[in-house]
Image: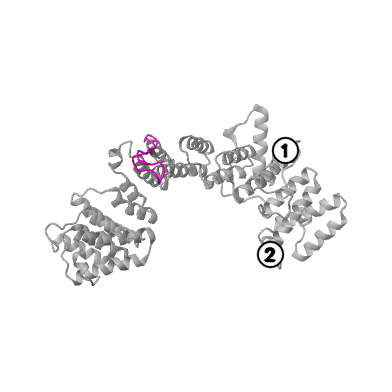
Amino acid sequence: MHSPEWHRLTEDEITHIIRVFNNQFIFEHTEDALNRASIIIKLCNDREVKVATAAFYNECIRTNVYMNKRDAAYKIKEDMDAGVYGVDVRSDIYTYTSIFSDTNAKTSEDLARLVEFYDEMLSRGIEPTELAKKPLIKLARNVGEHRLLKALLESPETEKLTTLHAATAARMLSNRAQAFIAEYDVDSAKSQLEQLLMYHIPKDTRAVPFSPGYSVGSADIKIPLDFTRTREAFFIYTRSLYESIMRIYIIRRRANDAHELLDDMRRTIYLPPTRMAYNWFIRFHAKRKNIQKLHEMHDMMLQDGVMPDEYAYTKFITSCMYHPNPSRLQKLVDTATRRAYFGAKDEEHEPNVGLDEPEGVHSSGLPDVPRHITELANIHNIVYHPQACTRFYKSMFLEHEADIDDLRSEKCQPNAHIINSVMCAYTMLEKPVLVLREFQRFVRYQHRLSPHQRPPDLMKSIIPVAHIFKMALDAARVINNQWMARKILAQMDVWGVRLPNPISKEA
C-alpha cells in the first residue's frame, strides 16, 4: 500500500476493492476481509484522499456496520447529508441499504432503530427496493414483529413484476405468506401460494459452447434450467410455502386439506417434498393407527426418491403393534364398526386425537379396556397389524441394501422400539424362530454400541427392552431350546434387565 502504485488507483478502483472485501465477508464470514477493508479506509483517511462519489462512502458504511461500529457508520451518513464530502455526495437507496444490512442487529431495539432510518428514507421520497427491505424482513420475523413484517411485505413491487420474474416473485410472495402463517392466517397464506403459481417457471436462454474444445459460436446449445440456481430457487421457495401451509393444516387436524395440498405440490413442482414434511404426515397417521395411509405415505416417499429415515420407519413399524389407550381404542372400534356398516371408509370420521397426546407404551398384549370392546370378535384385526409390521420391516432392510437374515450386517441397525414391535408381530404370527432371530440382532447391535459396559439404549427404553427379553424367553421355551433360554437369562443378569411384572405380562 505504501508503494507509488497506490497513487495511481482511481476512485472507482478503491471503491471496488472495498466492495469486494465486504462481499467476501458476507459470503465467507471471514474477519480478515473486514480487516483489509478497514485498512484501506484508514489509509484513505490518513492520506486525506478526496472521493467525490457516494458509492465509496456507502461501502465505508457497510464495513463499519459489519464491524459493529454503528456510530462511525451513522457519522459518515450525517456528513454525507451535511455536504461534507461534496454537493453531489448525498444519501441514496444504497446508503440506507448499507445501514439496514446490519448483521449484528438481533433485538427489538435494533429493529426500532433501523425502522427510524426506514421512515426517514420514505420521507425523503426514496423508493425502497427488495434488497433494502430484505434484512428488515428477516429481523422482524426473528423478533416476532409480525405486523411490521406484513407491512414491509405489503408492497406494490409484486404487482410490478412480470411473469418472467418468477424467482423474485417466489421469494417475495413466500416471505409474505410466512408472515400470514406466523399469525395463523392460513387462508391468506394459501392465496399467496395461488398467486405464486400464476407465474411462469423460469426458462434459460443462455447459450454456451458444447464442450471446452469448441469455440463459443461453433456449437451453442441451451442449458436446461433444471440444474441452474434461478429455476431451483423458484421451486425451493414454492416448496417451502407448500410445506408451511401443510404443517398448519396437520396441526389443526385438517388431514384431507393437507393431503390435497401434498398431491398438488407433487404435480406442480419437480422438487420432491422434504423428508421432514413426510414425517409430519407419518406422525399424524401413526398416532391414529391409520395403516393404509401409512402404506400410501411409504409408497409416495419411494416414488419421490425420499428415503425414510429411522424416525419414519420407527413410526411405520411401531404404529402397527402398539396398543392405544381405552379412549382411542374406543374410537378405533367405532370407526371400524361404521366402515363395516357403510361398506366403505368414512374419511370424515377418522379417530381424531390430539398431536400432543403421549405415545402408548409399546407392549405385546391387549390393554385393560371395557368389556364390550374386548368381547368384540375382530379386536386383534382392529388394533394389531402384524403382517403390515413385518412388511415395513423388510422394506427398511431393502432400502438399506441389507440382508435381513445377516445378523452381522451393520447396514441396517433397528432400535429397541422397532425390534420390540417386530418381535411382537412374529409372536402373533406364531414364528418363534424369527422372534429369536430379532432378539439376537438386538443383542449384537447393543454389543457393538457398548462392548464393555451396559448399553445406553437399555436405560432409555426400559419397558421395550424388558418385553424383548420376555418374548425371546417365551419363544425359546416354545421351541424347547433350553440352551437359548439359559443364554437369554444370562444376558439379563449381565445387563440387569428385569422381566415385566405379572400385571403387564401379556405375551
Residue at x 37%, y 34% (from the top left corner): 198
Residue at x 18%, y 52% (from the top left corner): 124
Is residue 78 or residue 25 the one in the foreground? 25
Is residue 96 or residue 44 the one in the foreground? 44
User: Is 349 displayed left or right of 459 in the figure?
Assistant: left
**Residue type of the residue flagged with mark 1:** Asn
The crowding category of the residue bearing disc 1, from other C-alpha atoms within 10 Å (few below 14, some 14 to 19, many at least 20), is few
Quadrant of the snapshot with the N terminus: bottom left
Main secondary-structure element of the magenta-colored stretch: loop
User: Is 106 displayed left or right of 96 in the figure?
Assistant: right
Is-magenta flag for residue 68? no
Tag 1, which secondary structure?
Answer: helix
Is-magenta flag for residue 206? yes
* Residue 130 appears in the picture as rendered: yes
Residue at x 18%, y 49% (from the top left corner): 125
* Residue 324 appears in the picture as rendered: no
Task: Look at mark 2 in the image and give the residue it sits on.
Answer: 450
User: Is 419 displayed left or right of 232 in the figure?
Assistant: right
Magenta extent = 196-220
Look at the image and name its color scheme.
one colour
**Residue type of the residue flagged with mark 2:** Ser
Q: Position of residue 471 (x, y in %)?
A: 78, 52
Q: Position of residue 505 (x, y in %)?
A: 78, 52
Q: Quadrant of residue 464?
A: bottom right
User: Is 34 displayed left or right of 237 in the figure?
Assistant: left
Image mark for residue 381: 1
Say which of marks 2 and 1 sits in front: 2
Residue at x 78%, y 62% (from the top left corner): 491
